[in-house]
Image: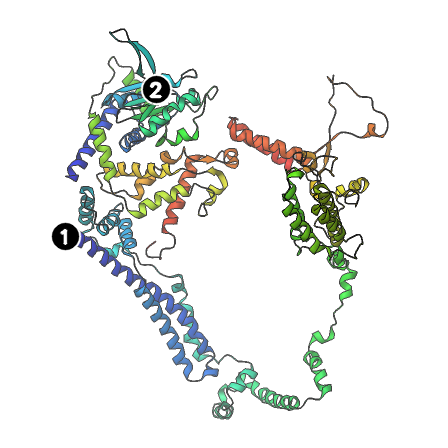
Amino acid sequence: MDDAAALRLTVRRLIRVIRLRRAVFYGLRGLAWGLVLAVLPVAFRSLLGPVALALAAGLAGAGLLAGVLSGLLLRVPPGDASQVVDRAFGLHDRVATALELLAARDETALALAAIRDAADRAQGLDPRRAVPWRWPREARLIPIPVLALAILPYLPPVPLPEDIVAPLTPGQEPEQQRTKAEAPQVADRPAAKRPERAERVELQEREYAQRQAPTPEQARGDLAAVFKDTSVAQKRPDFSSFLKQGDERLRLLERADSLPDLQRDFTQSPYKVVFRKSRTLLSGIDPNQLSRERLRQLLEEMNRMGRRGGSPGGEGDWSQDVWEGSEALEQGQMSRALDAMERALGKMRAMEERERGGKGLEGGRDRGGRGRDASRGAGGDGEPDFGEFEGSLPGKGTNPGWRGDPTGRLGQSPIDMGVEGQARKGRKEAYDTNMMGRGARNPSRLPYMSVYSQYRKMMEDALAKESIPFDYRSQVKEYFQSLEER
Amino acid sequence: MADERTETFVRSYEQLKNEVHKVIVGHEEIVEQVLVCLFAGGHVLLEGVPGLGKTLLVRTLAACLDLSFARIQFTPDLMPADIIGTNIIVEDTGGRRHFQFQRGPVFAHVVLADEVNRATPKTQSALLEGMQEGSVTVAGVSHRLPMPFFVLATQNPIEMEGTYPLPEAQLDRFVFKLKVRYPAIEELNEIVDRTTRPQEPTTDRVMTAEQVLAFRELVREVPIASHVRTFASLAVMATHPQWEGAPEVTRKYLRYGASPRAAQALVLGGKVLALRAGRFNVSLEDLKAIALPAMRHRIIMNFEGEAEGIDADRLILEVVEAAETATREGKEVFLR
């Protein structure tokens, strides 16, 4: 036998062992579940009659068979099987490598040596030692259903609700009564319920009779009849008690108009769309080099939306401005056309703000700039502004040109706390400024969160980049953690 | 034929190791890994406190090999030209002057870059091309380095004042980073004995350049199974916190993972270990045995890892374990 055949034979034998072990493993698992299922027909044998035992045996057998079959038929890749051999016998992946070399038809000197070496070592190995017996967890539970199956036939059948049993076994009633008469020794146990069942059957018949011809009054009273005999019928919902208890969430629901409209995508509003286009059109371009065609398209688009902007000629109607812009464009007056477009944009924005009302995502908090804008006349007809540029230049919110990023202070989180400094003792190098008036009582403050995050970042950089002695690192980290907790 | 070559390799390897151990006491693992690196065709970075015999090990190894040896003591004022060489003006017999390339110490088979982190990054990077390409370029002219070219660099983890930690690109070019530990008491006694006798031990040259090159070729022929190769890739990928299969420890403590060179180092080192054991294939155990030296210098901790003082070696062991589990995941219970 050559090396390749010897190796393949070893792996085939191992695969056979794996299949057998699997058959036992999955067979036991299937048997366990089959036995659990078999308990059901035995327990409810009164419902199924003589077929119950056959059904139970069938379920247990089917579980076992399904498990064994799946164990036998489950695929065993030869590569995986060879790794099992290697691990089990400490062959350092010799067999797996050799099989791959055989499959690849590698005939280099080292490959042939590897195959020969693997075949030599694999010969005479007992594959049964490579695959240990494994027992499924369910196997430990097998005694429970077996015990149940052994005891249940000697116990009375599980009582079922009569309204289920009665319709399913209408022909069994006389037979059971006859059995009862013939076997009086079991009549003192659950059979005591049987007269009641007879009464229930009568009751059902009476109700059927009612439902066959319900009067309107009876039909109305059906729902009350459902609760007639229950404790629920005595209770009435008292919704006002929730409000009395002061549930804030319910109160919030009363003010639905102040809740943010989360379903609305503000970025896709007509104003935003037109605004973005106008910004793209105007950004960084000399007004004299503007494309007339694009400006006309923009004005036409604004004109299309203009009709929705309120009463004609009213505050929210920008069609007049658009018309003026178009006319100016026809006459070649670009700056006039731009002015008209800006006015129209201002009106669109005002309408947008009105529509949003207090429903902005800013939680009803008055936008810091709005009050200031009002004093500057921002958003008005006289001075249209592009609201997007707020903050581009501190104190110059109406300037449409970008002049750099907003300052750190403007960009910071509004939820911060100002920490007052403490004057140190001793001689100071700086001059004291004599201040008078209300401002003198105002201490200087630093925004805590913002400053803290800056220092924390510096600390992280220092720990990551600089050679801080190891013993000090945890100390530095703990110090900043304690600050964070405060 | 293969058996003969393998047997020769095993015999020569053992002979070389024994020669080195005539001078070097202990450090079995370090010597083993230096030799693995020599035959894998890579370069080694030795890290340890002064006096542990790093330089002596390199000098001894060079003495045991029939190869040229150069030692460069890295200092802050060392310039790239001091390593690579420079063009000088020479006058021939006819009185004509022309530039002639004066070779630097890098033109040796075995180069000891002693205290490599004391030189500036500019000088450190002078070694980059030589380590990767096996050639250096001066004034637009490329010069081949002698083969085999083997760089052994040493660095001191303490006394960081006035040093320039090696950049990641340079670190990545070292196949292994070895940590030289302090010797045990018995080893220390032996060191004292050997070094205080009238005659210090001497070594013989047991391997030529041609033999080293032939062994390097032989090593590359060693076959590797696909699942072993996959394990190497998984171990490297498991160091990347962005990878979806990365273990929790990686996501928590690592900022950057190992480069593909780590996988190459694992496989090549594994091949040498397999061949040294007289085996013709690489096993998972071979890769696991060299995972630490091949990967410890290729991972970068994040802030959490640095602050918690996580040991790179321990982390790599966990990552390797996770990679091994991942290779068996999804397999049926009898094949796991």
Residue B13 at least partly seen: no
Residue located farthest toward the right when viewing the structure as drawn: A437
Task: Report whether B189 appears left or right of A251.
Answer: left
The location of residue A412, given as percent across then percent down, is 68, 37
Q: Are marks 2 and 1 on the same chain?
A: no
Q: Is residue A245 above or below residue B290?
A: below
Give the amino acid at mark 1. Answer: Asp
The location of residue A344, given as percent across then percent down, is 74, 48
Q: Chain of mark 1?
A: A
Mark 1 packing: few (<14 Cα in 10 Å), some, or many (20+)? few
Mark 2 packing: few (<14 Cα in 10 Å), some, or many (20+)? many
Give the amino acid at mark 2. Answer: Ile
Quick one: quadrant of the N terminus of chain B? top left
Element marked by disc 2 = helix
Residue located farthest toward the left when viewing the structure as drawn: A1
Task: Report whether B99 appears left or right of B305.
Answer: left
Task: Report whether B216 appears left or right of B171.
Answer: left
Q: Look at mark 1 in the image and give the residue it sits on.
A: A2
The one nearer the camera, B28 or A261, is: A261
Element marked by disc 1 = loop
The one nearer the camera, A83 or A198, is: A83
The location of residue B302, given as percent across then percent down, is 50, 36
Q: Residue A127 — which label?
A: none
The one nearer the camera, B192 or A272, is: A272
Q: Look at mark 2 in the image and give the residue it sits on.
A: B84
Q: What is the quadrant of residue A446 in the picture?
A: top right
The one nearer the camera, B104 or B311, is: B104
